Image (cartoon, helix red, strand yellow):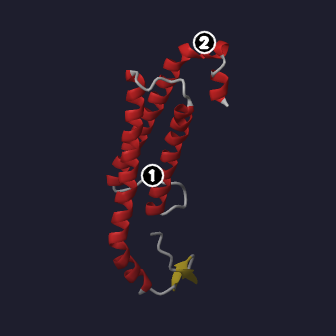
Amino acid sequence: MLGTLLDRPIIHKTFEPKYKILIDMCSKELDTVKVLYDQQLASMKSPTGPIVNKNMPKVSGSLRWSQQLHDRIELTMGKLQTLSCISRDSPDTKDVFSKYDEMMNYISSFEADVFTRWASDIETIAKTNLEKPLLVWETKDGKEVLKVNFDPE
């Protein structure tokens, strides 16, 4: 819809000075996403592990987090790419699209790395956990209670 509006001369003339502002906003959004990505990489190396949503295991939480980050920049850049009137030859526009490509590569490699590490460890983790009993006795408030032996991994 925005593309058809920008074909109108009066609207195009009004919108033209705002191209630079729009490109700058997209650039700032990509910089923010890069900061979030760097924070997640740092938390992956920390003893507490990655930052994930509540009640999510580390692996699926990390993959979901990366998908949300992907969706965040895809939404922003998808709208920018639909504008036919933006010059793709300007240095600012080239910079934004190169940042976008760089972030998409980072996110793809992050997802591949998380999955590869999980796939290499899953056989031993599954074997270990499948050898454990499903139910265990636990003392709680001086009483013996039956508990499901659930591993959060």
Between 152 and 112, which is closer to the camera in this rendering? Answer: 112
- Identify the residue at horizontal 34%, vertical 47% (top origin): 42
Decide if residue 91 is on the left or right side of residue 8.
Answer: left
Between 106 and 7, which is closer to the camera in this rendering? Answer: 7
Residue 78 on image: x %, y %? 54, 38
Q: Is residue 110 visible?
A: yes
- Identify the residue at horizontal 34%, vertical 56% (top origin): 47
Q: Residues within 10 Å of mark 1 (few under 14, many from 20)?
A: some
Between 39 and 138, which is closer to the camera in this rendering? Answer: 39
Q: How many marks?
A: 2
Residue 135 drawn above or below residue 30: below
Q: Is residue 39 visible?
A: no
Residue 105 drawn above or below residue 89: below
Cα separation, mark 2 vs mark 1, equals 45 Å
Which residue type does callout 1 highlight? Ile
Q: Residues within 10 Å of mark 2 (few under 14, many from 20)?
A: few
Residue 39 on image: x %, y %? 38, 43
Decide if residue 46 is on the left or right side of residue 66.
Answer: left
SS for callout 2 = helix
Q: Which residue is mark 2?
A: 13
Q: The C terminus lies in which quarter of the figure?
A: bottom left
- Identify the residue at horizontal 62%, vertical 13% (top origin): 14
Q: Which residue is mark 1?
A: 51
SS for callout 1 = loop
Residue 33 drawn above or below residue 27: below
Is label 2 in contact with label 1 (beta carbons under 8 Å)?
no
Residue 133 on image: x %, y %? 47, 87
